[in-house]
Amino acid sequence: MRYLRAPAVFALALGLVASACGGGPTTTPTTSPGATGAVVSSEPFVMLSTQLNTVTESEAFRAQILSGFTAAKVEFRGETAGPFVDRIVAESRAGKGTVGVIGGLHGDFGAIDLNLFEDLTPLATKLKDRGFPAEFMELGKLGTTRQIYIPWMQATYILGVNKQALQYLPSGASVDNMTYQQLTQWCKNISDQTGRKRCGLPAGPMSLLHRLIQGYMYPAYTGGLVSTYKSAEAATLWRDLKDLWQYTNPQSLQIDFMQESMLSGEVWVGFDHVARLVKAFEGKPNDFVAAPAPKGPKGLYYMSVLAGLGIPKSTPNKTGAEAFIDYMTTTAVQGKTLSTVAFFPVLTQALPADVPAHLKAIADGVQKQAKHADAKVALLPIGLGAKGGEFNKVQLDTFQRIVIRNEDIQRVLNEQATILQAVMNDTKAPCWRPDPPSTGACQVK
Amino acid sequence: MAVRAGRALPFPARIARSEAALPLGLLAPTIVFLTLLILIPVAQAILLSFQAVPGTLGFEAYRRMVTDVAFADSLRNTLLLLILVVPVQLVLALAMALLIHSRFPGHGVFLYIFALPLAISDLAAGIVWLSIFADTGYLNSALNGLGLTTDPINFLSYENLHLLLGTVIVAESWRATAIVLVILLAGLQLIPREYFEAADLFGASRFKRTMLIVLPMLRPSLQSALIIRTIFAFQTFAVVLALAGRQLPVLSYQAYDWYYNNRNEFIAAAFAALILLMTMTVVFFYLRLLRVKDAEIQR
């Protein structure tokens, strides 16, 4: 018996590690008339999404929103960008798919061969009177004549501010109309007077730091991103960011979601995606206010994040998928999406009346940002395809080298600009807003 | 059994042939398995690492790998973890195995406690230790509660890399010592009791028994344990990711990052090939250094 014990423990441990794999319940497909009048198949399908892929978001989405769609059984699967692309491509190559609908950001669609998607122009025509902004529908074509996705929901990035921080605002500065230098001064005041660094930047491994650099700071300082990557204005930006970093909580390098650090009180002033701030507002609605991002010499640039719904050609249930997109873009479900997962509607109508107070507070900040006198929109990178990750890495590496490792600013910018240009040449992506339009690949000047 | 094959003995000859085929037959499933699931993918990955420029074979992926901002750091951190974690684990596991092998009352309970981390996934282990070392974690709360600190100690900051590395070593040691323990314990149990009886007869002390019987007889197990642990050390990933994020890059994280976040399978394959090369080099040295001669096995 003694001789058997060690292997037995090992086997027990392995048994515990191994997880059981089981098949899901199967349903017999039937057909029934759907909302749009066409006959909708009830063949079950998977909704694969790069959005709402955290456990809490996924669960809320399944319980509150998926449950209202009854025409077919839809299984929601959240994925990160890599496996997301792999699965769609693999199913398409296999010629047999389980993914019926795809939910992703504008850039996620751009990372996949657009020929793998159904043309949704007929569906777009059918949904015309929903009130999608024309700009969003145009983005949904990704530069083709085909409607690749239907707009689903949108978001942006703002500042979340603990009310305790307001007393340390530099004189003459307003939280709703602040420059990046004033933000640094504010963070310095907080650090000097409370003894703790309480400003936060999301810079963890799964954070969205690159968006702050791409859509906010670069445009606000240089009026561009790619074309101005190594300009003198860009050098000023990095000097200012380095200044700000001195008064930033060093834990920032592990912060992926600002809300947790804001709730625990480690961070008082934090910049992040609204969906990554919302829990702070929800948990302590009286403690926080939402403010627009700061502005730079070229204005207040902000990034509008658009997510869409598309149908892969390998879908097991095309009519069901169309009925599902129809359902997701109704006013009622759009309102519910806001209150459940804090993504804003893509329809032009007013917010529903029953939106919870913490979301109204965030919506206030978002609106102040959009309506700011100097506000201008920057877009997520377009046309980079699978190179989107390498593009982000250029900004993240620049941040790492200049801000964390204290390397010489202009030398780093010159070197990283070469890598950036290689990415642009590989993809032949033309410039997008706010860079001036280009013929051929966008060029670093 | 020696069978002389000859024309006059067709039947025993057939037996001899089938006996010669038996080992091959028994090995066949393993060979097929290794070929399909290990050899072919490894060959494909290595090929991929030379194909960064479409249509040509070249070292572009390797050039970009070594010029990557985090390359030098990740190489250094991986080697540091290897050098620091593996000896700690080996000593701990040997002590734990000897403790259990001494069969003091209640030793079985210790075996189950020691082996528990085997049942926990890497990432879960990383998150458990994160909850201990975080600013608002258990350790800081305890230090604060005992009145030893007023402000939390920032264990996990890039500003104090030694502390950060220390937390990773503690977490890694906790997580993966059990596998070494299980191998060593199995090895201990295989040592024939006669040796110990003979040692008792000659009045050998406990220390002498350990040095002259246990350690030499344990060499094959030590070799297996070292090889397995070293391979794991090169693959350390989830614990580092949970505790240190991007602040403490290691090679396997770079491979992951290039594949999933940067969507460049060529550079990811180059990192994987580098890990493979380093693992094979170290394993080769273990096999040479701890070589078990046939004579020793038969002794």
Image (spheres, coloured by chain):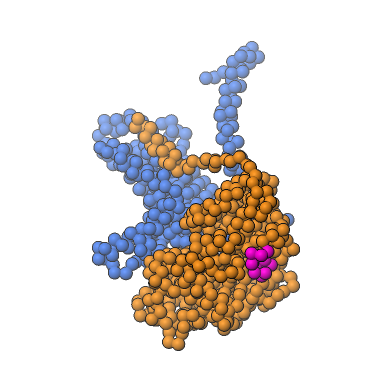
Residue A96, by quadrant, is top right
| Residue B299: x %, y % from top left | 41, 31
* Residue A343 lies within the magenta run: no
Q: Hue of chain B?
A: blue
Q: Which residue is located at x 63 percent, y 14 percent?
A: B10
Left or right, residue B144 beside residue B219: left
Q: Which residue is located at x 48 percent, y 68 percent?
A: A359
Residue A48 seen in this snapshot: yes
Q: A85 or B65, which is in the foreground?
A: A85
Q: Quadrant of the C terminus of chain A?
A: bottom right
Above or below, A302 against A46 in this view is below
- Give the magenta range: A128-139
Left or right, residue A327 beside residue A203: right
Left or right, residue A249 beside residue B59: left
Q: Hue of chain A?
A: orange
Q: Which residue is located at x 45 percent, y 43 percent?
A: A17
Q: Quadrant of the N terminus of chain A?
A: top left
Q: B191 or B152, which is in the foreground?
A: B152
Q: Which residue is located at x 55 percent, y 41 percent?
A: A25
| Residue B265: x %, y % from top left | 62, 55
